[in-house]
């Protein structure tokens, strides 16, 4: 069994903005890390865990908020999130962003289409 993430592990630890989706029997738990503002994810075989950290989906955005959701539409996976780039970083003035996501052969999430599993 791997060691649990510690509160001092600011690059990987859960802070807020949880989202979960399921694909091929795997639960993908994504979240914001807090003061490092990464959007990370972990996977598990149950929605209750345990989960294994898998990596970052999104680097920090303008305005530090990394709240998000996923939507599958017509066979494509979309990441919706927000930042405050239109207001120059004022945290309470946010704009919606969308990016397409792909799965790799090993089931990892990526925003890099070149790493995507060929369907």
Image (spheres, grey):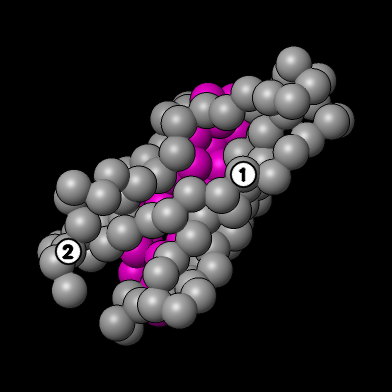
- The label on residue 97 is 1
Q: Is residue 23 above or below residue 67?
A: below
Residue at figure coordinates x 45%, y 39% from the top left: 58
Figure quadrant of the N terminus: bottom left
The part of the chain drawn in magenta is: 27-54
Q: Is residue 80 visible?
A: yes
What is the x, y in percent for residue 21?
A: 48, 72
The residue singled out by tag 2 in the image is 117
Residue 33 within the segment the image draws in magenta: yes
Give 88 or 44, whichever is nearer the viewer.
Answer: 88
Residue 2 in sight in this render: no
Whether 36 is among the magenta residues is yes
- Residue 49 in the figure: left or right of residue 19: left
Which element type, helix, strand or loop, lies under badge 2?
Answer: loop
The residue tagged with tag 1: helix, strand or loop? strand
Q: Nearer the viewer, residue 7 or 45?
A: 45
Q: Looking at the image, which is closer to me, 114 or 20? A: 114
Q: Is residue 68 left or right of residue 99?
A: right
Q: CA distance from mark 1 to mark 2?
A: 24 Å
Query: Residue sitting at 57 percent across and 28 percent down?
Result: 61
Q: Looking at the picture, does residue 27 appear above or below residue 91?
A: below
Residue at left 54%, top 68%?
71
Disc 2: CA contacts within 10 A as few (<14), some (14-19) or many (>=20): few
Residue 43: x %, y % from top left: 34, 63
Task: Indicate left or right for 63 with 27 as reference.
Answer: right
Looking at the image, which residue sits at the far bottom? 25
The residue at the far front in this view is: 74
Residue 24 place in picture, x, y as percent:
29, 82
Is 92 placed above or below 77 here?
Answer: above
């Amino acid at each position: 069994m791997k060691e649990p993430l510690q509160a001092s592990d600011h690059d990987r630890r859960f802070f807020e903005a949880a989202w979960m989706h399921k694909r091929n029997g795997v639960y993908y738990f994504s979240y914001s890390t807090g003061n490092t503002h990464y959007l990370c994810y972990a996977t598990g075989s149950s929605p209750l865990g345990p989960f294994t950290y898998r990596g970052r989906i999104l680097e920090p955005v303008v305005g530090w908020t990394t709240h998000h959701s996923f939507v599958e539409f017509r066979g494509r996976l979309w990441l919706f999130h927000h930042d405050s780039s239109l207001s120059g970083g004022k945290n309470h003035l946010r704009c919606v962003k969308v990016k397409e996501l792909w799965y790799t052969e090993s089931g990892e999430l990526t925003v890099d289409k070149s790493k995507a599993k060929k369907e």
